Image: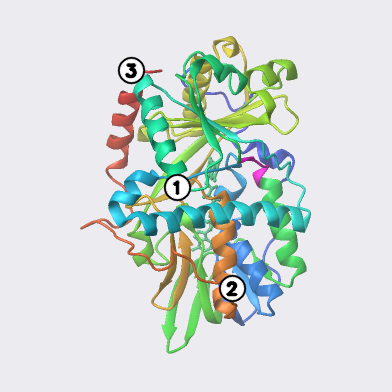
Amino acid sequence: MPTTVTTDEVKLEPFWWEAAPRPTGVPTEVPERVDVAVVGSGYTGLSAALTLARGGANVAVFEAGVPGEGASSRNGGGFGHGLKVPFSELTRRIGLEPAKALFNEHAASRKHLIDFIRDEGIECHFVNRGRFTGAHAPAKYDSMARELAFEQKHLDMDAEMAPRSDQSSFVDTELYHGGLWTRFGGHLHPALYHQGLLDRALAAGAVIVPQTRVARIERAGAEFTLAAGNHTVKADNVIIATNGYSGPVNGWLRRRLIPIQSQMIATEPLDPAVVARLLPEQRMIGDTYQLKHYYRASPDGTRILFGGRAGGEELNDPKRSGVHLHRRLTRLFPELAGVGLTHSWAGFVAFSFDYLPHFGVQGGIHYALGYCGSGVMLSTYFGHKLGQRILGAPGAGSPFENRRFSTRPFYTGKPWFLSAVMAYYAWRDSRYI
Ligand SMILES: Cc1cc2nc3c(=O)[nH]c(=O)nc-3n(C[C@H](O)[C@H](O)[C@H](O)COP(=O)(O)OP(=O)(O)OC[C@H]3O[C@@H](n4cnc5c(N)ncnc54)[C@H](O)[C@@H]3O)c2cc1C
């Protein structure tokens, strides 16, 4: 197997952009003053803009690239259960009731996403048939079973453990040692979902300003001034919705976020019967490796869309990560060894130091970010809540609001340690795959 994919055969951009090409265009109308300026046009920014515009606010969304160019049109589209921190660990950290409040709020974000897509009639190949998380080792299966028992004691968890003998009805691989089957969760087409949000935000009257990076935000009393591309814009409120793409525009946030690349590949079209056997029922699949995989079938059931975090810095190049992910895919499904790729791409997610998402106000600026690689549900929900909060609407609060958001001494937002950490994780995984 070569160590790089050749660009003639493999497109180095998301498979999702085939069905939902990124809207091009240059800024046309840039207002000089708005009620709310939003920085970033992913799910968080657009969801906030939609709620605000429907609530009567004058809102402009500034986007450094084309709309949705960040993670929101690149992700795996998976949604489901749980925060990155296991419920038992969170309980030890902050106590049972606060931990329950955060997990229940996370579950509320799932309901919000499901209701929102249905009520808005957004066509994004939404599939809600559950999610299977394969255990990469027998001991991991046991610890997942203990965690599930604890969750089921305190939370509403419609899930069960599926032993290895049953796992082929979820995913047909020899590599897992059984896994967790949650009956809720699933996947959507991320770029079509983004398009649906964009269309609705525009129809509600929000102004989207593409190709316009916000370089600076200054505050004088109750008013903010943004340097956005060549424009100076005044705003009463500002929302930062830049997640894994957070740059120097707000140093306080940047010092609290660790940007990490997540990568995906799309296989060439396969016999749909093979895809349906390997991934029955169009479910979302994940696993418990240190560098976890997440994958699913394409909406038409002919391809496998496979994601993960490749490891060391040198793999932060879709030509090389594509080869690495292909190798992982064929370790899970040896019969795919001869199957080619059509797309290999990557995007940035943002981790926080406490592995929890954050939502709040700092220096008068509203933010929602740090989704730790699982933001499809929460970004939509938090964006909506930010909008509600600015509008002064009831129900705008959240147990996630203004929680302690820590950084580390000397950390400036450039994760110099990441390469070593990822290489260590890859080494730990190498015993199992
Ligand atoms: C490959 C991949 C796979 C993933 N898979 C899943 C999954 O299966 N399930 C799941 O739940 N989550 C997944 N995620 C995470 C999920 O996509 C994100 O959590 C979510 O999209 C975050 O949305 P957002 O709007 O906050 O940020 P983004 O969509 O990243 O948008 C941020 C935007 O801000 C813009 N920006 C940054 N700085 C500025 C500036 N100064 N001025 C103007 N604009 C600026 C950027 O250009 C970008 O468009 C995945 C992410 C990736 C990359």
Percent position of residue 116, x then y: 69, 57
Q: Is residue 255 left or right of residue 361?
A: left
Circle 2 Cα neighbour tier, 10 Å, few/some/many (<14 / 14–19 / ≥20): some
Of the 4 image quadrants, the one containing the C terminus is top left
Q: Is residue 376 magenta?
A: no
Residue 330 image label: none
Quote the CA–CA distance across marks 3 and 2: 48 Å
| Image height of 363 relative to 379, above or below | below
Q: Is residue 342 visible?
A: yes
Quote the CA–CA distance across marks 3 and 1: 26 Å
Q: Secondary structure at mark 1?
A: loop
Q: Most extreme residue toward the bottom, as rendered? A: 221
Q: Secondary structure at mark 2?
A: helix
Percent position of residue 6, x then y: 57, 24
Front: mark 3 or 1? 1
Percent position of residue 36, x then y: 58, 77
Task: Name the residue rendered at 56%, 67% in the picture.
Answer: 385
Give the labeled residue for mark 3.
Answer: 431
Give the labeled residue for mark 2.
Answer: 388
Task: Name the residue rendered at 60%, 56% in the picture.
Answer: 43
Q: Give the magenta-colored segment's residue range.
A: 185-190
